Image (cartoon, grey):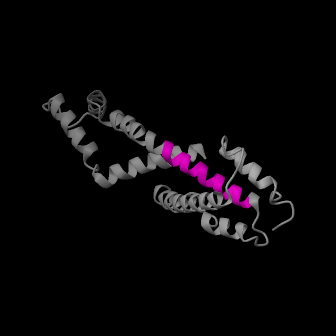
Amino acid sequence: MATGETSGSGEAPRTLGQALGPPATERLDPGSVAELAALLVDFAASLDQVVWSTWRVVNPNSALKRGTPARVSMARFAAGEPGATREQVKQDLEKLRQLTAALTAAAGQAGRVYGQKHVATFAPAEIEKIAKLTGGSGVMVGQEVKCWRKYEELAGGMDAEAIEREVVGAMSAYAESLL
């Protein structure tokens, strides 16, 4: 391990105990600690895979790219490989935490953002305003017909794929704003 990168063997249990809080601050069982570490590695590795795969779908053109997979960087650090530092693992996990939080928050906001945009486009008052401004098919055509035609024009390009693109776009924009 790189010099100064890990806690001394006496400090590691204390650091873990502090992270876990009472009653772990009093005594840690080495076998249980090893099992806990394995569970946390599996959790972080599977979350890493899902979150980064989701991010590639939500924002394929993002400058934010996945580095070394979490399982690989944690394994290198645990094996004491040169260059595999605690700080690097910490940075990788922090990036994963931030992206997970951003995607989770974005999922909660995507519906609202899409809904606002949809209402701004398809609200009856909005369609009526646009229909009046654009005129239409002559003086003999009633306002209701003009509104219906405007609605059909606006809704013509709306299908499931277009809605999905808008929702995913809203998620992407919101998540990017948090990163």
12 and 135: which is toward the camera: 12
Residue 163 in the image, given as x and y percentages of width and height: 33, 49
**Viewer-nearest residue: 4 or 162:** 4
* Residue 130 seen from this side: yes
Q: Quadrant of residue 115?
A: top left
Is most of the magenta stretch helix, strand or loop? helix
Report whether 32 appears left or right of 81. Answer: left
Q: Is residue 26 above or below residue 89?
A: above
User: Residue 136's image quarter?
Assistant: top left
Q: Is residue 61 visible?
A: no
Relative to 121, is 82 on the left or the right?
Answer: right
Instruction: Tell me which residue sits at (32%, 55%) in the image.
Output: 161
Q: Identify which residue is drawn at 60% across, 54% down.
A: 96
Asked whether 156 or 19 is in front, the reply is 19
At x 28%, y 43%, the residue is 154
Left or right of 77: which side holds 47? left
Horizontally, residue 139 falls left or right of residue 159, namely: left
Q: Position of residue 173 (x, y in %)?
A: 51, 46
Residue 156 higher or lower than 74, as above or below:
above
Tell me the quarter of the image containing the N terminus.
Answer: bottom right
Count how many numbered circles sit on residues in the image.
0
Q: Which residues are magenta?
A: 88-105
| Residue 83 position in % (x across, y down) | 78, 69
Q: Residue furthest right?
A: 3
Query: Residue at the spot x=52%, y=61% of the render?
Result: 46
**29 vs 69, nearest the viewer:** 29
Query: Does the magenta segment cover residue 94?
Result: yes
Instruction: Please tell me whether residue 29 belongs to the stretch shown in magenta.
Output: no
Residue 125: horizontal and vertical position, in percent?
Answer: 28, 27
Query: Which quarter of the figure has residue 70?
Result: bottom right
